[in-house]
Image (cartoon, rainbow, N blue to C red):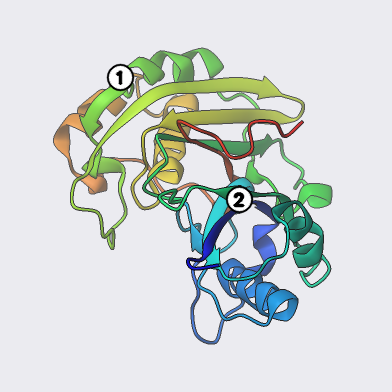
Amino acid sequence: MNTPRRLALLVAYDGREFHGFQRQPGFLTVQEELERAWSATSGETAVLHGSGRTDAGVHAWGQVVHFNTWSSLPAAKVKAALNSYLPDELVVRASAEVAPEFHARSSAVAKRYGYLLATGRSRPVLRRGLVAWEKREDLDLAAMRAAVPFLLGTHDFSAFAAAGRTTKTSVRTLSSIHVHPIRGGFGFLFQGDGFLYKMVRNLVGSLLEVGRRRRAPQWVGAVLASGDRRKAGPTAAAEGLYLWRVVYPQDPFRNLA
C-alpha cells in the first residue's frame, strides 16, 4: 500500500468507568483504551479521532471514531479484534473502511443525544449511574413540551453553554426536541447540527425548571435571547446523557441492523 487506509468504528460505552472520551494523562478514557486495543491488535501506534468528546460519566451508543492504518486486516474483522482487547464497559459495534476524506467530527451533519431521567422518591438503585434522578413525581410534561418550540431553529445558544468551550461560534441549529414519558420517568431526545459544551445537560436542566413549575414555558425563550448562562437552569447530571447517533451524508454503518 502506498497510502494508509482509513477505518471508522461505531462505539458504545458505559461512561461510569471513564473520565470522558478524550485522552487525559492519569485518567481512564475511551480514546486511550481504543488506542491501546488497536496497538495490541496491529502493533501500530495510531490516534483515534472521535466525533466529539463526552464528559466523565456520559454514555454512548453511537459514538463514531476514525483512524488511519497501514494494517491489511480486513475492516470486517477489526470489530472482533478490538473487542478482544477492550474492557467490558467499552465495545465496538461495527467497523468499516471509509474514504480518505471521511472525518468522524467534521463530516457529521447532525448529532442525536438522549437523556434518561428517573422520577420518584426512591433512588433508582438498579439503574444507578445510567439514569439521572428527580425526586418529584409530578413533573409537568405538557409545560416542558410547550417550552420546546422556543428552542427549535437556529440560535446563539450561549445561554446554555458551559464555560470552557473551544468552538468559534455558539450558533447552532436544533431540528427536533422530544420529551416522552417512559416507565418510571422521562426521556428527552435532542437532534441538532452540533452541540456546545454541556449544552444538552443545560437544556435539560432548564426544561426541568419548567417541569417543576418554577418557570413558565416562555422563560426558556427569554433565557435563550439573553445569552447569559447565569439565567438558565442548573446543569443536569451527567449520568443521564447518551450520545445516541451521529448522522453523516454517507453513513458508514447504514446497513447495521
**Residue that mark 1 sits on:** 150
**Mark 1 neighbour density, 10 Å: few (under 14) some (14–19) many (20 or more):** some
Q: Is residue 192 above or below residue 241?
A: above
Mark 1 element type: helix
Residue 216: x, y in percent? 34, 20
Residue 168: x, y in percent? 18, 52
Residue at the limit of the structure toward the bottom, as seen here? 26
Q: Nearer the viewer, residue 161 or 145?
A: 161
User: Which three-letter amino acid code belongs to the residue tagged 1?
Assistant: Phe
Residue 54: x, y in percent? 50, 57
**Residue that mark 2 sits on:** 97
Asked if residue 111 shows in the view, the reply is yes
Give the numbered dot on residue 229: none
Q: Is residue 208 left or right of residue 157?
A: right
Instruction: Compute the Cα span from label 2 to label 1.
Output: 41 Å
Residue 8: x, y in percent? 58, 53
User: Which three-letter amino acid code belongs to the residue tagged 2?
Assistant: Glu
Q: Nearer the viewer, residue 62 or 108?
A: 108
Mark 2 element type: strand
Residue beneath the point at 75% across and 51% down: 76
Residue at the limit of the structure toward the front, as seen here? 2
Residue beneath the point at 57% across and 25% down: 139
Residue at the limit of the structure toward the left, as seen here? 226
User: In the picture, which quadrant includes the N terminus?
Assistant: bottom right
**Mark 2 neighbour density, 10 Å: few (under 14) some (14–19) many (20 or more):** some
Comparing labels 2 and 1, the label whose residue is closer to the camera? 2
Q: In the figure, residue 117 lies in which quadrant?
A: top right
Asked if residue 20 shows in the view, the reply is no
N-term mark: 2 or 1: 2
